[in-house]
């Protein structure tokens, strides 16, 4: 008689992860002297690692205790260099006098000893890190995070700003609106367009007051003088014009540019006009005599942004060659070249109160100090588009307008991006016509005007109903600061 048939038990399929863990457990069981525990630490390697960290981070910091330490957990981090340590001791630096008296061992220091609150380099009170002691096998229970330094972020916390919203859309131009300038009395502003006209609008009502014709190509730069009744315009037709606002007509032209003129600025204290264009030169003009004083040459590509100051550097230019140059207006020579950007510097904005400015490129928005041009920091987000325009007001709200119609608002001090708005194109326009070409705050800084590719001018203001509770500040300090 045949015997009973033996049925094979089904083998449970095991995942690669499970098999890996099994193999790891076998290896630990095989090599670990204490089953269920990780291998004992190597004090020599830990000493090297920690002394390297201490010497980099806390070199020159005298560790002083703010309360009496017990014999078992006191450690002084005065010097990173150390004598050989006995095998059962995990002291990172020379033991304190208490330790020497009591002969206590098995001390593990995980950070600098507690020290009085001091001001760090940004001016914020720094917290101290605790000293953690462990003995025997319990030191294996410390995770690696205990070895990491725990210090608060030195980054300044951003000021809360209410969000901005559109409150008026002005139509009137027949082409892209490329430039804008405000009247110093804050009653009107002018816009230049690809329809070759300059239009003057009332600030309060948004009504059209005047249209000026004379350019034969798009108008890319505008400036209104605070000392004379003059307005200046520049365009792709190589022309730079001076308009008398009492007669409403062009009274002077400044000839010299070899190609289109892309940017224009008026010196705040002397009667000098600066224009930059596709001929890679920033030209300095005497307003009254129409004479060219200097041709500031040195850029390798189009000069597309310029601003002026009363003190040195009196002229700062940004170019498609991705550099920013500071110019000495006495000799017409370069004082300094900033090469931090990787792409064209199409827009720059000078802070109205502080001695610093921001520059925008497709890679990053960067802040620089004046007059030396020290790099301060990058803005904490990337707009990831070509930025054509930027403006900052006295409250520290920086606005940047992109080629894709994105209008981002930043806190100037911290570089935090607190609002990302998207412009809405005029009905009948294509979505691809959502582009912002010029931005300008009014004299008070409470209204922002954007000039756009859908032929409109949009006016923005802060939301009066917003509070820090309705629009909380979602800010995380940066872990690492991108230096370039």
Image: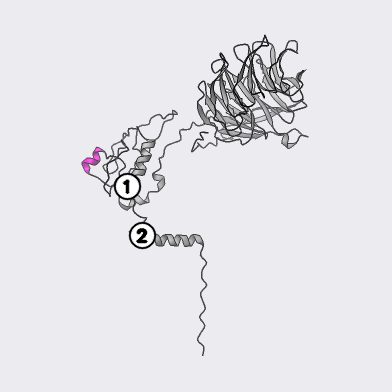
Q: Is residue 471 above or below residue 204?
A: below
Residue 147 position by quadrant: top left
Taking depth in this image into account, of 24 and 236 the one nearest to the observer is 236
Give the residue drawn at x 67%, y 33%: 403
Prevalent SS, magenta region: loop
At mark 2, the secondary structure is helix
In the depicted view, which residue is nearer to us: 4 or 239?
A: 239
| Residue found at x 53% / y 17% | 312
Q: How is this picture coloured? A: one colour
Residue found at the very far left of the displayed protein: 101
Query: In the shown orientation, is residue 437 left or right of residue 352?
Result: right
Q: CA distance from mark 1 to mark 2?
A: 20 Å
Name the residue that disc number 2 marks.
Answer: 31
Specify whether 287 is left or right of 338.
right
Is residue 89 in the magenta section? yes
Q: Pick the residue in front: 30 or 285.
A: 285
Q: Are the residues tagged 1 and 2 within 8 Å (C-beta)?
A: no
Check disc 1 and report its element: helix, strand or loop. helix
* Image: 336 above or below 478: above
Q: Please name the residue that numbered disc 1 is placed on.
A: 44
Residue 368 in the image, given as x and y percentages of width and height: 53, 26
């Amino acid at each position: 008689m045949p015997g009973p048939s033996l049925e094979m038990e089904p083998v449970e399929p095991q995942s690669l992860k499970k098999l890996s863990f099994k193999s790891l457990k076998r290896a630990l069981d095989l090599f670990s002297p204490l089953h269920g525990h990780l291998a004992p630490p190597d004090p020599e390697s830990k000493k090297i690692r920690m002394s390297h960290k201490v010497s980099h981070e806390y070199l020159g910091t005298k560790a002083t205790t703010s309360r009496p330490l017990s014999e078992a957990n006191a450690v002084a981090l005065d010097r990173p260099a150390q004598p050989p340590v006995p095998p059962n001791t995990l002291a990172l630096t020379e033991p304190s006098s208490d330790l020497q008296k009591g002969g206590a061992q098995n001390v593990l220091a995980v950070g600098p000893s507690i020290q009085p609150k001091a001001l760090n380099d940004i001016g914020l009170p720094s917290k101290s890190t605790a000293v953690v002691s462990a003995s025997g096998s319990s030191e294996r229970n410390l995770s690696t995070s205990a070895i990491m330094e725990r210090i608060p972020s030195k980054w300044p916390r951003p000021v809360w700003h209410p969000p901005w919203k559109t409150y008026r859309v002005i139509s009137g131009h027949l082409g892209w609106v490329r430039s804008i300038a405000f009247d110093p009395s804050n009653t009107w502003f002018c816009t230049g367009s690809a329809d070759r006209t300059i239009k003057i609008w009332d600030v309060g009502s948004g009504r059209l007051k005047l249209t000026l014709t004379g350019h034969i190509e798009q108008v890319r730069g505008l400036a209104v003088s605070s000392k004379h009744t003059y307005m200046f315009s520049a365009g792709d037709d190589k022309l730079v014009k001076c308009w008398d606002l009492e007669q409403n007509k062009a009274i002077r032209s400044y000839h010299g540019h070899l190609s289109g003129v892309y940017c224009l600025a008026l010196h705040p204290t002397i009667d000098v006009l600066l224009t930059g264009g596709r001929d890679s030169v920033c030209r300095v003009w005497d307003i009254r005599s129409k004479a060219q004083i200097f041709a500031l040459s040195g850029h390798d590509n189009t000069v597309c942004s310029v601003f002026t100051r009363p003190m040195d550097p009196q002229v700062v230019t940004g170019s498609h060659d991705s550099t920013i140059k500071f110019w000495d207006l006495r000799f017409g020579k370069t004082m300094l070249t900033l090469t931090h950007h990787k792409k064209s510097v199409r827009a720059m904005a000078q802070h109205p109160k502080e001695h610093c400015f921001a520059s925008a490129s497709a890679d990053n928005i960067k802040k620089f100090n004046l007059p030396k041009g020290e790099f301060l920091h990058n803005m904490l987000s990337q707009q990831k588009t070509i930025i054509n325009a930027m403006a900052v007001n006295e409250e520290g709200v920086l606005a940047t307008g992109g080629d894709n119609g994105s209008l981002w608002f930043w806190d100037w001090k911290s570089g935090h991006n607190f609002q990302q708005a998207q412009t809405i194109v005029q009905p009948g326009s294509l979505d691809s016509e959502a582009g912002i070409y010029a931005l300008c705050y009014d004299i008070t800084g409470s209204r922002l005007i954007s000039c756009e590719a859908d032929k409109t001018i949009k006016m923005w203001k802060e939301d009066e109903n917003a509070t820090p509770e309705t629009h909380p500040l979602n800010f995380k300090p940066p872990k690492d600061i991108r230096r370039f």
